Amino acid sequence: SYPFDVEAVRADFPILDRKVGGDPTTIGQDDSDDIPLVYLDNAATTHTPEPVVDAIVDYYRGYNANVHRGIHQLSQEASVAYEEAHDTVADFIGAAGREEVIFTKNTTEAMNLVAYAWGLEELSAGDNVVLTEMEHHASLVTWQQIGKRTGADVRFIEVTDEGRLDMDDAAEKIDDDTEMVSVVHVSNTLGTVNPIRELADLAHERDALIFADAAQSVPTRPVDVTDLDVDFLAFSGHKLCGPTGIGVLYGRESILESMSPYLYGGEMIRRVTFEDSTWEDLPWKFEAGTPSIAQGIALAAAIEYLEGFGMERVQAHEELLAEYAYDRLTDLGYVDIYGPPGDERGGLVAFNVEGVHAHDLSSILNDYGVAIRAGDHCTQPLHDTLGVAASARASFYIYNTVEEVDALIEAVSGAHELFA
Ligand code: PMP
């Protein structure tokens, strides 16, 4: 049984009542939309519940204004709400306070912020940065390019045949020349839940820093930066019921203090002369220009919405659906699933159906109203190690049901029949 009332949850997401099947260039509501939507692409982006939509609408209808600098009432209201959103995030992830929470555009920008502001300054030839073979391009491409610019070596902890990190390899690759370990917490392709605390201990023993890419973990389980002992952590609002255009970089205060800004401009300075400038306090030092105000406020609303369930129960729901999907896909007998067993993964399953290209599969599933992702999921090098160019991925969230997994299975077997 579900850890909460899923039907009641679904009522908060009107988009889930959408029908599909019509001409996508007409955006939605055309008459030939008649197939019920089964949305299983939550690792790409999640939907937005009514309280979060309300937070956005309330802001634009009620107190839209620029933040930090206005003395007038609307600006003060917007500033309080935007600044307090940082506190909500800090509480949610166990950070010390708003000074450790920087709002960015998304996970990708958070990664680039650290790579530019810390990496370009701190790395040089002889140093190394340790990633894993299952990194998302957001971290892989970023550190790879910073490695080229600084001369630092970029290494990859190997993934075992079962889709887990080879921790013996991790202990070898993280060495005295390691400056940064950047690891995905929950893999968006394999569903693997990586041992971040263990890796943080390995990194810190060598005086290296650790950055957790938590794009898939913060939305789906309790995450506490103090328990994980990470120096940096990033996630995106749009993967946890929030809007696009807002992400979070958590950074340990002492390290953020020692870093120079990544972007310069308004809102991040304290005093400017023609000759020089000084910086605002954290976190504003890293938030140059007018920020995504409504999105930041709505991110806090999304977090409050999820806290209404409790992240333990969100995790339980994810695991229930992932294990059920894993077992039913396995039972079909002609599906290759990537990553660890059903009872050891985050809420997603990437797979290939024998004889059917992932893109064809996704297109046939679309005819059934089933939305999944097909492609490399921004993990091309990992797909190279798996020996496939692409895979199909079904990913679940709080509003998905066992019946929707059944609909996926029916559509997959329909596609297999068509091609076999
Ligand atoms: N890392 C992981 C593990 C992800 O799944 C994603 C989103 N697919 C990202 C990073 C990048 O997130 P965004 O596109 O929101 O920056």
Image (cartoon, rainbow, N blue to C red):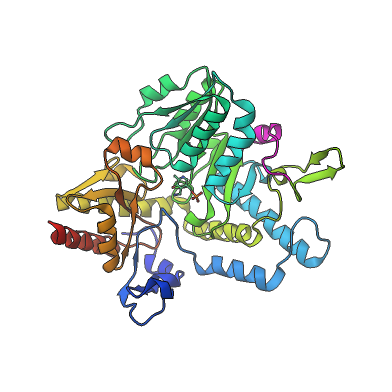
**If the image is split into quadrants, where does the N terminus sit?**
bottom left
Residue 382 seen: yes
Q: Residue at the spot x=85%, y=43% of the render?
A: 271
Where is residue 133 shown, x and y percent of the image?
Answer: 38, 34
Q: Nearer the viewer, residue 192 or 181?
A: 181
Q: In the visual, does 179 lie left or right of 23? A: right
Q: Is residue 386 left or right of residue 95?
A: left
Q: Which residues are magenta?
A: 251-264
Q: Quick check: 113 left or right of 417? A: right
Which residue occupies the foreground of this view, 357 or 184?
357
Q: Residue 254 magenta-drawn?
A: yes
Q: Is residue 305 magenta?
A: no
Q: Position of residue 231 (x, y in %)?
A: 57, 34
Kindly indicate the quadrant of the structure image that contains residue 232.
Answer: top right
Residue 371's image quarter? bottom left
- Find residue 264 and report its horizontal and vertical position in percent: 72, 44
| Vertical side of 139 occupied by 235: above or below | below
Q: Residue at x 63, y 62 (%)?
A: 294
Residue ID at (46%, 63%): 47
**Where residue 227 sits: x, y (%)?**
52, 36
Q: How many marks?
A: 0
Foreground pick, 110 / 380: 380
Q: Is residue 317 above or below residue 130?
A: below
